[in-house]
Amino acid sequence: MNKAAYNYLNSVRVLHWQWLRLKAKHDELETCLLPAAIRYDKDKVQSSPDDAIGKIVAEIADLEYKMAEIQYAKSVRIEEIAKAINTLESDEERTALTMRYINRVPTSEIADAMGYSIKRIYQFMDQGGAQISKIIKPTKD
């Protein structure tokens, strides 16, 4: 499988990693809004102009929007990849590539499920990837 095919098939995973990074930041910012994180001036809740709560809420909303965009891009990419995989003639190649790049199943589990050696699964994925590299559009790395 050439680099273009690998990058194309792996792009779902890359989008998932981007989403995970945003989710981690989102979750960390949300902890700043918990009652223990809110600071008090004697008996009054802070509401001074330098209060960070409004900024945190805005940043959380922005992160949620970006996360939704990534989820949409990921779903579109999954559909594209599934369509490309379904053009393959070999059922073994289609199954191995679908399990690996759509369902993100470890190669050892694919081998067990399909009844082949891990080496043979890599061969199926390599052969299928070579076929897919002929039909894909170039993607940005």
Image (cartoon, rainbow, N blue to C red):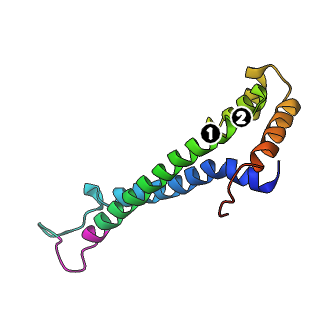
User: From the viewer's perspective, is the residue at label 2 or at label 1 nearer?
Assistant: 1
Residue 126 drawn at (x, y percent): 83, 41
Residue 19 drawn at (x, y percent): 51, 54
**How many numbered marks does the figure carry?**
2
Picture quarter containing residue 94?
A: top right
Labels 2 and 1: the sequence-earlier one: 1
Q: Badge 1, how many Cα within 10 Å: few under 14, some, many 20+?
A: few
Residue 48 magenta: yes
Q: Which mark is residue 27?
A: none
Instruction: Give, as a single range, the part of the protein colored magenta.
Output: 46-55
Q: Residue at x 35, y 66 (%)?
A: 59
Q: Badge 2, how many Cα within 10 Å: few under 14, some, many 20+?
A: few
Above or below: residue 57 compared with residue 135: below
Q: Residue at x 25, y 79 (%)?
A: 50
Residue furthest to the left: 43
Instruction: Specify the quadrant that holds the C terminus.
Output: bottom right
Above or below: residue 1 compared with residue 91: below
Using the numbered discs, state the Cα–Cα distance from disc 2 to disc 1 in whole angstroms.
21 Å
Mark 2 residue type: Pro
Above or below: residue 128 compared with residue 114: below
Mark 1 residue type: Lys
Closer-to-camera residue (130/57):
130
Residue 83 magenta: no
Above or below: residue 59 compared with residue 95: below
Residue 8 drawn at (x, y percent): 68, 52
* Residue named by callout 2: 106
* Left or right of 132, for residue 75: left
Q: Which mark is residue 83?
A: 1
Q: Residue at x 62, y 54 (%)?
A: 14
SS class of the residue under badge 1? helix
Residue 87 drawn at (x, y percent): 70, 36
Closer-to-camera residue (73/67):
73
